Image (cartoon, helix red, strand yellow):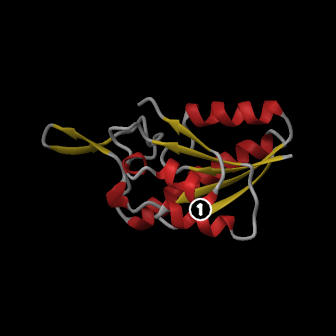
Amino acid sequence: MRSYLVVANQTLLGPELQKELHKRIEAGPSSFYVLVPNTAAAHYHTVPAAGGLMPMPSVVMDFGRPASDEEATVQARQRLDQVLADLAARKVQADGDLGSAQPLEAIAKVLTGREFDEIIVATLPRRASRWLRADLPHQAERRFGLPVTTITTKR
């Protein structure tokens, strides 16, 4: 059985990641651990709009921009619960939790005592992604010695 560590937050329910998980499931027995870095409300992606900034709803999958860090945590937990329920409904072994807002720190903690065949990172488009600007996929690959697949949303 292949074991995958999925790292995502705002993109967790996006079609690009769901398609990638489906490919892994179809390829053979799979298990998933879904890690959701608990992003602060101030770091949710926004786009410029007349009179200020507005959340990018297509990216945050109808959750909108949280008003507080507590609300951001609730939304992250909702996305996590939804993806775990979807995987369970497909009879796929899956577990997960919220982790540090710092993705590399969160990944390191999960890797303590667990082994994975691959890390799958789902992120916002390049123009909006703090993770891609920080070179998270390559840093994770070098630091943890695992192959990393990067899924970038199109919106």
Q: Position of residue 48 (x, y in %)?
A: 21, 40
Image-quadrant location for residue 154:
top left
SS assignment at label 1: helix
Establish if 41 lies above or below 17.
below
Q: Position of residue 150 (x, y in %)?
A: 55, 40
* Residue at screen point 12% across, 42% down: 51
Q: Farthest residue toward the left?
A: 51
Q: Which residue is mark 1?
A: 107
**Quadrant in the picture for the C terminus:** top left
Q: Nearer the viewer, residue 93 or 114?
A: 114
* Residue at screen point 45% across, 46% down: 63
Establish if 125 lies above or below 141.
above
Q: Position of residue 17 (x, y in %)?
A: 59, 37
* Residue at screen point 51% across, 49% down: 138
Q: Nearer the viewer, residue 126 or 100?
A: 126
Residue 126 as seen in the image, left or right of residue 8 = left
Image-quadrant location for residue 18:
top right
Name the amino acid, label 1: Ile
Establish if 106 lies above or below 119.
below
* Residue at screen point 68% across, 64% down: 111
Q: Nearer the viewer, residue 107 or 48?
A: 107
Residue 82 seen: yes
Q: Position of residue 69 (x, y in %)?
A: 40, 66
Residue 131 as seen in the image, left or right of residue 85 = left
Local crowd size for mark 1, using a 10 Å CA cut-off: few (<14), some (14–19), many (≥20)? many
Residue 99 seen: no
Count of numbered marks? 1
